[in-house]
Image (cartoon, rainbow, N blue to C red):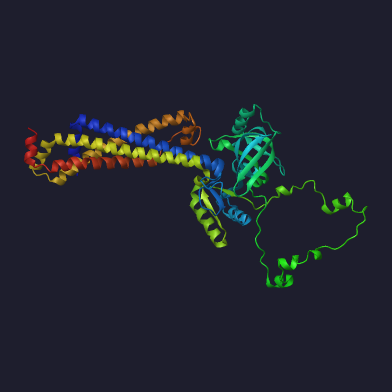
Amino acid sequence: MKIILTIALRNIREHKVKTTIIGLIMVIGIMVLVVGNSFMDSAAAGIERYYIQNYTGHLMVTGQSRGQLTLFGFQDMTAMERAVPRIPQYAEIVEFANSLPYVESINPQVSATTMISRGDKMLGATQLFGIVPEQYQAMFPDNVEIIEGDFWGPGSQGILLNKSVADLMERQVGFTFKPGDKILLTAASTISGMRIREVEITGIFEFKQSNVQLDMVSLMDVSNVRALAGMVVGHTEPADLSPEEQAFLGEIDEGSIFDSFDSLFAPAEVELDVAGDDYWFSILGDTESRDLSNVEDTGAWQYLLVRLTDERYLRQAQADFAQFFSEQKIPAQTRDWLQGAGAMAELSYGIKNIFNGVVFIIAIVAIIIIMNTLVISVTERMGEIGTMRAVGAQKSFVRRMVMWETLLLSGIAGTIGVLLGALILFILNRVGLEASNMFFEIIYGGPVLRPELSMSSVLISFVVILIVGIVSSTYPTAIVMKTSPLKAMESSR
């Protein structure tokens, strides 16, 4: 082995031009791999951190359903044809979530998409997140910046309008929307029909970390969002009566109740002065605060967002929730942050996969270039190799010699490439890459990307370049081995 390494090093030094050409190709290749993969790893980590900390938490609990269900509702062709399922046995799930030691906080939400109008003029659209302000702010304390006004107070109703939505509407009507103004919200679907609510703007806000999809999200009291989503009246389970209770009630059916309407009424004499307004109010009680069109079902939630103390507990949390749902026979499920984040996050990951495909193509091209260069290099050394074989060198010895030459060159070039890549990433991290348009903001996972050196990308890059070196050395070595030593020696004359 020592002899092979000595000869390999001598050959690298002797053929400086060819070594430099092949080395430069490898340096550029490894540098591109390190910078590119680190760039995409930083973007992916930024996207994940961006959504988990500001919108989705680590997990999203929903009712069981098929399809692409996100925080924004179903994002597929069936969105208008089915409602987002409610979380069944919500109180039990909340109690279980709070009992897990690795759960940091939870936040329930309801979602609806609505059109906004003022008077008879349609102004635009907004995605509504129905929330409880205290819980929402506790889970996402650093992402809502109030520009004017504030959240609605406890027991009150209202909408915190996204500044981007307000700006779009202002361009439509030439009117500046402020807290205290009222707007009309209309939601429509084939399931719940058309629903309209007039709400008061309690404040204008913007997300500190946002994108084109989140710029359309406004925050509103859960009561009104439930109404717009067709969730005002909750469902009731059939009563499970004991035999004693059934015997007490007897056999009751619709016929026995309504066989004679006359039995439901009896003549009564009421003095006119007794049946005045005061009399009826005494029966009805205080009706001023009643709004039967907005009766809340405290169990009507579509999403329960769960933030963990550490991302390492994610798989354990998914397994624990799945076991709990199975044991309690609750038709619910968990979805990870990427499923909950919606189209923009998935688009970012799609772009990353495209980039990885481009890197793979670059690696194939690098193999071909390096292979061609090695073929020329080894062919020019045909006489030298023929002489070695003529004096007794075995084919395996020559193969190992060429392979170690390539591996040494790959190792040296790879180290230089990693160092140059790390230097470039350090500079980019200090400067920061600002997103110049929406496309780059999607890729970066935010307005600014500060890429960091990814150790996984360094490892992957080294593995790739070593594989490239081994594969590249195989073909030219095979060509030389097919040539007889005598012919090889003659070719050097």
Tell whether 477 sits left or right of 278.
left
The image shows residue 413 at horizontal and vertical percentages of: 28, 35
Q: Judge by depth and name the residue closer to the eye, 480 or 289.
A: 289
Measured from the top left, where is residue 437 in percent x and y? Answer: 48, 30
Please give the name of the residue rendered at 56% of the width and 58% of the height, measured from the top-left corner: 331
Residue 304, position as x, y percentages in the image: 59, 49
> Considering depth in this image, is 161 or 294 the residue closer to the camera?
294
Depth check, front residue: 478 or 450: 478
- Picture quadrant of residue 187: top right
- Residue 421 visible in the picture: yes
Q: As drawn, which residue projects farthest toward the top? A: 174
**Which of the 4 image quadrants contains residue 177?**
top right
Q: Is residue 355 left or right of residue 138?
A: left
Quadrant location of the C terminus?
A: top left
Residue 4 in view: no
Measured as percent of width and height from the top left, residue 65 is found at 53, 53
Q: Name the side, left or right, on which 391 lies relative to 207.
A: left
Q: Is residue 486 left or right of residue 426?
A: left
Q: How many marks?
A: 0
Query: Where is the N terminus found, in terms of image quarters?
Result: top left
